[in-house]
């Protein structure tokens, strides 16, 4: 039963598979494992009644040691994406010269918004990271499985000098990220406040109860999302999307929940 998942993991075809070929592959590998692994271990196990006493302790030590191994780290996907891709004579896909000073290794910048005003470029973006948790708990007096999907979200802002002529001449297919007409260092927006002067944190959660298996799915967003830099009455302002912050730990609920 378990062996078939290992075989499926190394199966070269993704998605639907040819059932007859896959069963032949599983059966063939099962025969090889039985002859090369299971039977020799079975013989050793029966011939060494004292030696096998140490096996549980060796396995326990091995499992404890594996828990101290560092998590595998992978380079961010951007490292494999070209800095400039020319789509046609008038369209380029470019990587922006943005630096997030307070980002962790897991954070990514998404949904940047740009505004050019008075020889300056203003940038707003979203610092984003996803975390998932699953644990046993209680909901409305019922024992339940709690699934939390947490979106760590924060708006970052920055600005940099920019000449309109340099902007109009950029980019070309021969340019790289170093030749960008601007380079913006972004920092977290710490001055965002509610109407009562509190920080824009402790947002309301979205919850979905699944009665079939007593599971509560909770979607948590830690901060505002998807900022847009716009010009309003001659001033640069930032618009964003967000769930409302809680008021004294309580969220208003409408007919839709």
Image (spheres, grey):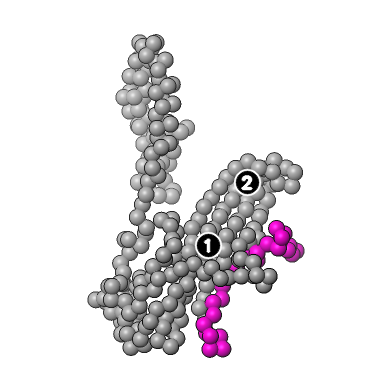
Magenta residues: mostly which secondary structure?
loop
Taking the spot 58% from the left edge, 70% from the top edge, the residue there is 192
- Residue shown at 31%/24% (left/top)? 36
Describe residue 174's horizontal placement relative to residue 16 as left or right. left
Q: Decide if residue 204 is on the left or right side of residue 4.
A: right
For the residues labelled 2 and 1, say whether their Cβ atoms are less than 8 Å apart: no
Residue drawn at x 65%, y 49% as measured from the top left: 216
Magenta span includes 241: yes
- Residue 109, label in figure: none
Q: In this view, does 192 lie above or below 162?
A: above
Query: Which residue is painted at 31% across and 69% down in the image?
Result: 83
Is residue 23 in sight in this rendering? no
Q: In the rendered image, which residue does mark 1 sit on?
A: 153
Is 227 situated left or right of 254 in this image? left
- Asked which quadrant contains residue 144, the reply is top right
In this orientation, does residue 107 appear? yes
Q: Residue 105 in the image: state x and y as whole percent.
A: 41, 56
Q: Is residue 27 left or right of residue 240?
A: left
Residue 24 x, y percent position in the rendering: 37, 35
Give the residues drawn in magenta, as a range: 231-255
Which element is circle 1 on? strand
> Height in image: 137 above or below 148?
above
Q: Name the residue under label 2.
A: 146
Q: What element carries label 2?
A: strand
In the rendered view of the protein, which quadrant contains the C terminus? Answer: bottom right
* Residue 210 drawn at (x, y percent): 67, 49
- The residue closer to the viewer here, 227 or 41, is 227
The numbered mark, 2 or 1, whose residue comes first in the sequence reads 2
- Reply above or below: 219 against 6: below
Give 169 or 105, whichever is nearer the viewer. Answer: 105
Q: Which of 77/121 is in front?
A: 121
């Amino acid at each position: 039963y378990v062996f078939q998942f290992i075989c499926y993991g190394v199966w070269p075809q993704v998605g639907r598979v040819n059932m007859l070929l896959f069963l032949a592959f599983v059966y063939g590998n099962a025969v090889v494992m039985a002859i090369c692994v299971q039977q020799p271990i079975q013989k050793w196990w029966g011939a060494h009644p004292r030696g096998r006493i140490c096996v549980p302790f060796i396995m326990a030590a091995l499992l404890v040691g594996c828990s101290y191994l560092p998590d595998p780290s992978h380079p961010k996907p951007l490292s494999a994406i070209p800095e400039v891709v020319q789509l046609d004579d008038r369209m380029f896909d470019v990587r922006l010269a943005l630096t997030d000073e307070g980002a962790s290794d897991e954070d990514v910048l998404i949904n940047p918004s740009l505004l050019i005003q008075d020889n300056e470029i203003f940038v707003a973006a979203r610092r984003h990271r996803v975390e998932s948790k699953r644990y046993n708990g209680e909901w409305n007096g019922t024992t339940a499985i709690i699934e939390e999907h947490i979106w760590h979200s924060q708006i970052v802002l920055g600005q940099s000098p920019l000449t309109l002529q340099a902007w109009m001449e950029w980019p070309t297919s021969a340019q790289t990220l170093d030749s960008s007409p601007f380079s913006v260092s972004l920092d977290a927006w710490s001055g965002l406040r509610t109407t009562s002067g509190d920080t824009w944190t402790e947002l309301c959660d979205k919850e979905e109860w699944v009665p079939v298996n007593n599971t509560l799915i909770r979607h948590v967003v830690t901060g505002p999302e998807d900022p847009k830099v716009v010009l309003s009455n001659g001033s640069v302002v930032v618009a964003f999307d967000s769930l409302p912050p809680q008021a004294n730990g309580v969220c208003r609920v409408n007919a839709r929940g």
